[in-house]
Amino acid sequence: MAAKTSVFYLTERVTLTTANAAVSDTIDLGAYVDVADRQGILVHEVDFITQAEDTATSSVTTLATALGGNTDVQFQLTDLNRGKMVFADDRALVSSGVLHFGDTNNTADHSSDLYPDNFGPTSAQGGRIIINDQMYFRAVASRTPVTGNTLSVVVRIKASVISLSQKDFMAIALQSTAADN
């Protein structure tokens, strides 16, 4: 595995407005992944940032103001589109996490379940190699934000473009195909 670029960041945001309604978006990797050159993306780190917005002023506000009660927010990044939140043993899962917001004592606890996963080959050096041309970001909240507010979750992906050996590329392609079924 040889790095073709230095580290760069990809970001995407989803806005949650309804309780228990998952919202998703696609992160296009087509400009970075090249099958002919056995080129892929190495995901080094994934961060999830949860923020609230006062829609009247278009400004960031506190979670306590926007949520008005205890809330759980779950988020996931996958390299296959499952159309729903997935379990931790799903090979498509790149990273996931949850934010627990307690309105009673105005506390928040954020944790990442997989950061990113280490299911890939040892040549990934603790990261996750993606050869699909898209990643999928999904989030869901247990509470509808208070009227006049929205809840946004941003995924921030630290990545680099890499060249893979024929064997590594084929192994990842086979793993991805198997995970698709």
Image (cartoon, grey):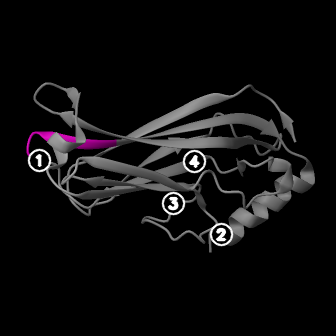
Q: Is residue 147 magenta?
A: yes
**Image-quadrant location for residue 179:** bottom right
Q: Where residue 99 sits: x, y (%)?
A: 38, 53
Residue that appears at 71% across and 57% down? 118
Are circles 4 and 2 on residues that touch, CB within 8 Å? no
The residue that disc 4 covers is 134
> Which quadrant is the C terminus positioned in?
bottom right
What amino acid is found at the position of numbered circle 2 in the picture? Ala
Q: List x then y, in percent, for residue 16.
A: 27, 49
Query: Disc 1 vs disc 3: Cβ atoms closer than 8 Å?
Result: no
- Check disc 3 and give the amino acid type: Asn
Which circle marks residue 179 in the picture? 2
Residue at the bottom extreme of this rendering = 181
Q: Which residue is the site of mark 3? A: 81
Along the polypeptide, which appears first: circle 4 or circle 2?
4
Q: What residue do we see at 64% from left, 33% from top?
A: 31
Q: Position of residue 90 (x, y in %)?
A: 59, 69
Residue 146 badge: 1
Residue at image point 75% right, 49% down? 126
Q: Residues within 10 Å of mark 1 (few under 14, many from 20)?
A: some
Q: Amino acid at mark 1?
A: Val
The local secondary structure at tag 3 comes to loop
